Amino acid sequence: MTILADVRSRTHGWHRPSAIAAAVLGAVAVLCVAAMLLDQRTLAGAPIWAKPFKFAVSGALYFATWSWLVSLLPRFRRTAGWLTNLLVAIFAAEYVLLVFQAARGRASHFNIATPQDALIYNVMGKMIMGLWVATLVLTVLVMFTKLEDRASFWAVRAGAVLSLVGISLGILMTNPTAQQLAQWKTGGTPDMVGAHTVGIPDGGPGLPVLGWSTVAGDLRIPHFVGMHALQALPLLAIGLAALASRFPRLRDDVVRARLVLVGALGYAGLTALVTWQALRAQSIVHPDAATLGVLALLAAVVGLGSWGAVRAR
């Protein structure tokens, strides 16, 4: 059974609270778009409601995927369900604080300008740690999933592991910048501790909607790329299964499994590449020769690996 057929057959058994959370967050994302049209305020150069919008979309994808993954577990499903309920509760509480700060026109992350801002950021930090621990345990439980299709088998496992890595990369944004450290050394107290960008203070030109810096490194990129391996690799397995009707070689689930593993390797390499690029204070839209060279090497490895996966008997 392919991953797409499995998704269809298990829909009635999906984890209900997280499925509801995904649907609610989808609706909230639409409300955030309306809020951006009605409320023209900006924060650090971005629309004040852009961050709630991005978190709503990302959360909807996250919970929809976990709702399905929990249904795959032949055992530990009750434990996984409880942990997923915990994820929903933590994310909901964090999102409320995020929206509260947006409504006030205040930054929700890294902000210690006032005692209230510092308290909110500290509480959100503890919530994120709880979310990470729950996701770690769920990732371990995913290793017990049973799928007949080998491509789906590996897509689910590799996607869960890489997604956890992507979530973990968020810790890089909490490190004080050189300017913030210098301010402490001179006896001052910075309003912000940590940053999205590397090389310049947060703000400035950025990509539409995403807001990723176009003039400096941006640590949100590896965080985003890694985290959504949870959706990307299962989608790869679905795509390969869909192509099997046109390409007979893909009807062999061993071949599709090899291609998924090559895709997982390429995805891990891409996550590492954008992390390296961001840490060197380099914008995603202005890669230097070194970045382009590594990207070309990665593309060659994935291309040759894919060719070998299809050709091998």
Image (tube, rainbow, N blue to C red):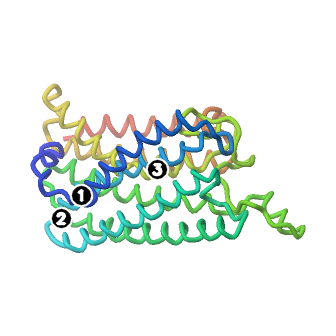
How many badges with numbers are in the image? 3
Q: CA distance from mark 1 to mark 3?
A: 21 Å
Nearest the eye: 190 or 152: 190
Q: Is residue 143 visible?
A: yes
Mark identifier at residue 55: 3
- Could you say which quadrant of the image residue 134 lies in? bottom left
Amino acid under disc 2 = Leu
**SS at mark 3 in the image:** helix
Q: CA distance from mark 1 to mark 2?
A: 7 Å
**Quick check: marks 1 and 2 in contact, CB under 8 Å?**
yes
Mark identifier at residue 73: 2
Q: Which residue is mark 1?
A: 69
Nearest the eye: 48 or 182: 48
**SS at mark 2 in the image:** loop
Amino acid under disc 3 = Phe
Compared to residue 247, the image places residue 31 above or below, namely below
Looking at the image, which residue sits at the far top? 246
- Could you say which quadrant of the image residue 293 lies in? top right
Left-right relation of 244 to 177: left
